[in-house]
């Protein structure tokens, strides 16, 4: 069922706002500072997904804004996306990534590429929308 919205019925929790810092398929990575994406560095490999952050949040694992990934078509750097998270990429070091987009992954590529992006020692595993909502709520409660 292609064309299904990324925030379809399998998602739970409130919408959150994220911003794209690194466009899927590109080497040029940006970082969100204030209200703008500024050049950060050129990576050796292209991003397998759109990568960015949730401005105004803080991940205690790394002291930076919560990281986010958007599955699907490439999104331009600086694009603001308001959506309900569809999952949580859980990492052993606590530097989890909030996932947006359809987890059904009909083409087989996005989720496999996302999981393969992290070395085995980071223990990358995908949890569902409820895990994302619970983790984000725990960060808010801790501030």
Image (cartoon, grey):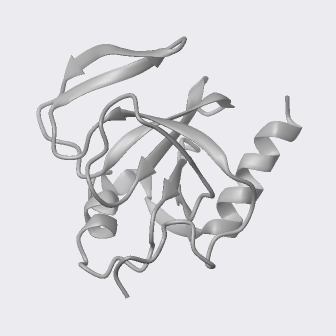
57 versus 98 height, above or below: above
Could you say where residue 13 lies in the image, as x and y percent from the top left?
75, 61
Q: Hey, which quadrant is residue 56 in on the image? A: top right
The reply to whether residue 90 is in sight is no
**In the displayed structure image, the side of residue 38 where residue 24 appears, left or right:** left
Q: Is residue 72 left or right of residue 13?
A: left
**Residue at (85%, 35%) from the top-left corner?**
142
With respect to residue 25, does 58 lie above or below? above
34 and 67: which is toward the camera: 34
Image quadrant in which the C terminus is located: top right
Point out residue 64 in the picture as x, y percentages from the top left corner: 57, 24
Residue at position x 23%, y 52% from top?
48
Name the residue rendered at 41%, 52% in the picture.
70
In the image, residue 134 above or below residue 18 = below
Quadrant location, the N terminus = bottom left
Task: Report the label total.
Answer: 0
Q: Is residue 142 visible?
A: yes
Q: Residue furthest left?
A: 44
Q: Is residue 46 above or below residue 28?
A: below
Task: From the top left corner, tell me how far across and down residue 63 is, in percent.
Answer: 61, 23
Residue 123: x, y in percent? 44, 58
| Residue drawn 50% across the image and 56% down it | 99
**Which quarter of the figure has residue 134?**
bottom right
Is 142 on the left-hand or right-hand side of 12? right
Q: Residue furthest bottom?
A: 1
């Amino acid at each position: 069922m292609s064309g299904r919205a990324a925030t379809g019925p399998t998602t739970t929790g409130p919408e959150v706002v994220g911003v794209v810092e690194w466009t899927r398929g590109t080497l040029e990575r940006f970082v969100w500072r204030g209200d703008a994406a500024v050049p950060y560095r050129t990576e050796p490999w292209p991003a397998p997904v759109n990568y960015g952050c949730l401005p105004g949040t803080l991940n205690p694992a790394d002291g930076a804004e919560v990281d986010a990934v958007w599955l699907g078509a490439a999104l331009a750097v600086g694009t603001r996306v308001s959506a309900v998270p569809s999952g949580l990429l859980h990492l052993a070091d606590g530097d989890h990534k909030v996932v947006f987009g359809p987890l059904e992954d009909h083409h087989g590529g996005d989720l496999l590429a996302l999981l393969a992006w992290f070395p085995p020692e980071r223990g990358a595993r995908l949890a569902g929308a409820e895990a994302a909502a619970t983790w984000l709520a725990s960060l808010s409660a801790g501030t």
